[in-house]
Each structure stands twice: as C-alpha cells, then as structure tokens.
Image (cartoon, rainbow, N blue to C red):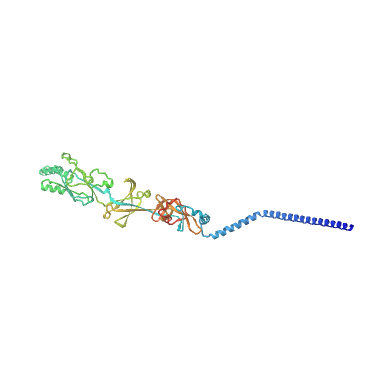
C-alpha cells in the first residue's frame, strides 16, 4: 500500500510538471505571435510612410495612365468632330429618351445632312409689271371754237392717227361769223390792215392756210369746218384713269386759243360722256379737250415688288427688263421713280422705269419682268433645307446619332432674309458648324402638325 501511494504521488508530480511546460510553450507561442504581429504592423506602418512619401509620384503616374486611356479612346474615334463624339456618347446612353420624343418634333432618319456656309450670295429679286404710256408725251387736242360734231373720224381708243390727218368736221355758227367778216373785208381792198387781222383770227381759231385760201377763192363760208390733227400718235380718250392725271382742260403747246371777240357769239353747252370720249352729234365748247395723242416713242415700265424686296428699291438702281413679246431681248435701264400706291385695299410700292420705243416693238399693257441683283454675305443654306409653316420657317437640326448610325433631328425656328431658287439667307436661329437635314420637306408628311 505504501508503494502504491508513492506511485500515485510520483505520477501526480509528473503530470503537474508536464502541464506547466505546456503552459510555458503556449505562452511562448503566444508571445512569438504578438511579436510577429508587431513586426507586421511596423512593416505596414513603414509602407504607409513610404506611400505618403511617394504620393506625388503616384498621382503623376495615375494622370499618365488616364491620359494614355484618353488618347487611346481618341484614336478609336479618329476623323469625327467633337460634336459627333458627344452626340454619339449621349445618344448611346439616352437612346430610349430619343425614341420617346413626339414624332412631330423629333425625327430619326438616315437623310443626308449639310452644314450652313458663310459666303457671298449674288441675291437676285424680281418684280412683275406692264408697259404703259409715258404721259409726259401726251398732247391735248382741244377744240378752239364751240359747235356740233357733224362727222367724226376718230372712232375708238388707242387709234393711231398721223399728223395733219382729218379728225372731225365741226359746225360752228361762231366761226361762220368770223368767216363772213373776213369775206366782207376781202371786198374792201382799201382796208388791208383789217383784212390781215381777220385772217390772223381765223388762223388762231384752228383754220389752216389752205383752208383760208379755199374760203377766199370760193367767196362763201362753208357749212362745216374740218379739224386736223396737230400731232402723230395714239388717241387716248381718258388717260387720267391710267396715270392719275387730272382732266382739267388747258391748251396744249402750239395750239393757242383766242380770247378776243369770242364773247359776242352764243355759248354752247358741251356734252361729257363718262369715259370722256366724243361722238357724232355731240356739242363741244370752246377749249374743251377732245382727246390726247401720245406718240409712244418712249414708254413707262410699271413694276411691283414683294414686301421683303421693297426696302432694296431706290432711284437709280440698275435693273434688267424682259418683255413677254421678246423674251430673248433684254433692256438695261434703272429705276427712275418710286411711288406708294393704295389700291384695292392694299398698300404697296411701284417702281417706274423709262424705256425707249422708237421702233415701236413694245406694246401697251404687255407684261414685263424687272430684275436686279446685289451681293450679300451671310450664313446660307440650300432652299430645300428650309420648311415653311405659314409665316414660320423651320430647319431640322441634327442633335445626335443612334447606335445604328441614324441621325436624330429636331425642328428649330429660323429667321430668314434673302432667298432665291437655290439659296436662303439665315439671319437668326442657326449657327455655323451645326448640321441640318438637306431636304426638310421629307421629314414630315402633309398631315403632321409640326411642333417647334
């Protein structure tokens, strides 16, 4: 028993010793781990310090790497403008947005685009008009003595008569009285001064020298007196209706009137027709205008222009005139007079030009086209790129490109200036460098209400 107890005591001491050794080993391992952790933390601390010290160099390296990336992306988009790059990038992300836009404001199409150009434009504008009489060349033909028209040889307006041609036969008791006085003085050869005065009176009343000689040879007063045309040209009964001339009667150049001795004869009440024409059997008064005669050797061209072109009209502006009767022949002249017209409830401007017509090739009321040109420098687009919505003009501006390569257009209002069959001047609403659809009329059908 004593031996067994000694064995147990020895085994217990051994176990206690082993346990203590295990604790020391564990403790030493723990300490070694702590030491290694401290070493690691120290290394990390040193590394952080190194990173802080090299911060500037790392930033420069990062910038260099980003520049390298940007250059590589630029190389992949070589040949495209910055607007195209931005548009493609935006539309690639927001393509759903473009597809949800209303079709009357945004259109996706593969139509060709063009860029406005800033260039000189030889702007040509035209006006339409007609040939009219130059009323400065119209001569009045008055009757110098009152009476009744027995025979009339001028039958219609615009009739052409020659100088010295008989125009009417007039019965006048007043002139018969003067003829009887002249015949009485012929039978009194002693008083030659009175005879010359009586002869001069008949000349002033419109009788020709041949007529007076015929009366002197016949020794009797004729029943009617023939009146001859003092001018050559076209007969105009009422030129005031076309030129605005008044119908106030006065004596034409070279026609002269007689004031002495006329009050003794009975007065005659004249007959006036609405168109100022005369007829056989009518009574005419002294100094009444029978009609006007225009030789038509120089004519007026009357032309009207649109409202947008009126501001360019001025006196002396060179113009080119073509006539419908001779489209291959042109006349070079200039504007001589500008006038404001109010007619038919409308106010507009008319340009007057003077054209020579000595050969008579220009005819009354024939149509003419008056054109002029001037250089204009501005932003120009083709005429097909502008679409008109009443008084509003729009263009379709490209705002992006889809992934498939289709163009995205949006409508935009522009203010236009000069325009002709080829080019249109853009004053506002569009900038140089923007791209627009070449044919604006194909972007929407006739039933679309375009939103702008």
Q: Nearer the viewer, residue 196 or 356?
A: 356
Q: Residue placed at 58% from the left, 58% from the top?
A: 69
Could you say where residue 275 lies in the image, as x and y percent from the top left?
A: 23, 46
One can see residue 73 in this view: yes
Could you say where residue 92 lies in the image, as x and y percent from the top left?
A: 52, 56
Q: Nearer the viewer, residue 199 or 261?
A: 261
Q: Is residue 401 left or right of residue 69?
A: left
Q: Residue placed at 28% from the left, 47% from the top?
A: 243
Q: Would you identify the image quadrant in which residue 19 lies?
A: bottom right
One can see residue 192 in this view: no
Q: Is residue 30 left or right of residue 406?
A: right
Q: Would you identify the image quadrant in which residue 54 lies?
A: bottom right
Could you say where residue 24 lies in the image, as x and y percent from the top left?
A: 80, 55
- Number of numbered labels in the structure image: 0
Could you say where residue 381 lies in the image, as x and y percent from the top left?
A: 43, 55
Pick out the residue farthest to the right. Answer: 2
Quadrant occupied by the N terminus: bottom right
Pick out the residue farthest to the top. Answer: 264
Q: Nearer the viewer, residue 319 or 73?
A: 73
């Amino acid at each position: 028993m004593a031996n067994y107890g000694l064995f147990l005591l020895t085994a217990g001491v051994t176990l206690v010793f082993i346990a203590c050794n295990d604790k020391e080993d564990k403790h030493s391992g723990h300490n070694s781990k702590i030491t290694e952790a401290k070493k690691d933390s120290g290394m990390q601390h040193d590394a952080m310090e190194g990173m802080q010290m090299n911060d500037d160099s790392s930033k420069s390296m990062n910038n260099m790497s980003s520049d390298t990336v940007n250059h590589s992306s630029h190389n992949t988009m070589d040949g495209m403008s910055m607007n195209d790059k931005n548009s493609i990038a935006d539309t690639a992300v927001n393509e759903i947005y473009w597809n949800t836009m209303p079709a009357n404001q945004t259109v996706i199409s593969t139509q060709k685009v063009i860029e406005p150009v800033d260039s000189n434009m030889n702007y040509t504008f035209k006006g339409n008009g007609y040939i009219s009489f130059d009323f400065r060349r119209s001569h009045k033909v008055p009757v110098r003595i009152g009476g009744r028209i027995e025979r009339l040889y001028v039958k219609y307006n615009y009739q052409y008569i020659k100088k010295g041609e008989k125009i009417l036969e007039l019965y006048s008791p007043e002139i018969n009285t003067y003829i009887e006085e002249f015949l009485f003085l012929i039978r009194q050869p002693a008083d030659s001064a009175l005879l010359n005065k009586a002869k001069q009176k008949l000349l002033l009343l419109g009788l020709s020298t041949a007529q007076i000689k015929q009366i002197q040879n016949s020794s009797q007063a004729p029943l009617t007196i023939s009146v001859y045309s003092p001018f050559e040209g076209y007969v105009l009964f009422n030129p005031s209706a076309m030129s605005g001339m008044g119908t106030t009667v006065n004596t034409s150049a070279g026609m002269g009137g007689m004031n002495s001795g006329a009050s003794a004869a009975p007065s005659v009440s004249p007959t006036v027709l609405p168109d100022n024409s005369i007829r056989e059997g009518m009574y005419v008064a002294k100094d009444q205008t029978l009609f006007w005669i225009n030789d038509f050797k120089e004519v007026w061209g009357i032309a009207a222009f649109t409202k947008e072109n009126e501001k360019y009209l001025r006196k002396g502006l060179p113009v080119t005139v073509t006539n419908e009767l001779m489209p291959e022949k042109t006349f070079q002249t200039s504007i001589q007079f500008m006038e404001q017209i109010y007619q038919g409830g409308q106010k507009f401007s008319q340009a007057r030009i003077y054209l020579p017509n000595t050969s008579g090739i220009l005819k009354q009321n024939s149509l003419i086209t008056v054109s002029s040109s001037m250089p204009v420098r501005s932003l120009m687009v083709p005429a097909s790129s502008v679409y008109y919505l009443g008084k509003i003009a729009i263009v379709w501006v490209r705002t992006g490109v889809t992934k498939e390569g289709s163009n995205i257009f949006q409508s935009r209002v522009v203010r236009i200036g000069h325009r002709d069959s080829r080019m249109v001047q853009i004053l506002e609403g569009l900038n140089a460098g923007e791209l627009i659809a070449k044919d604006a009329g194909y972007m929407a059908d006739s039933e679309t209400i375009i939103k702008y």
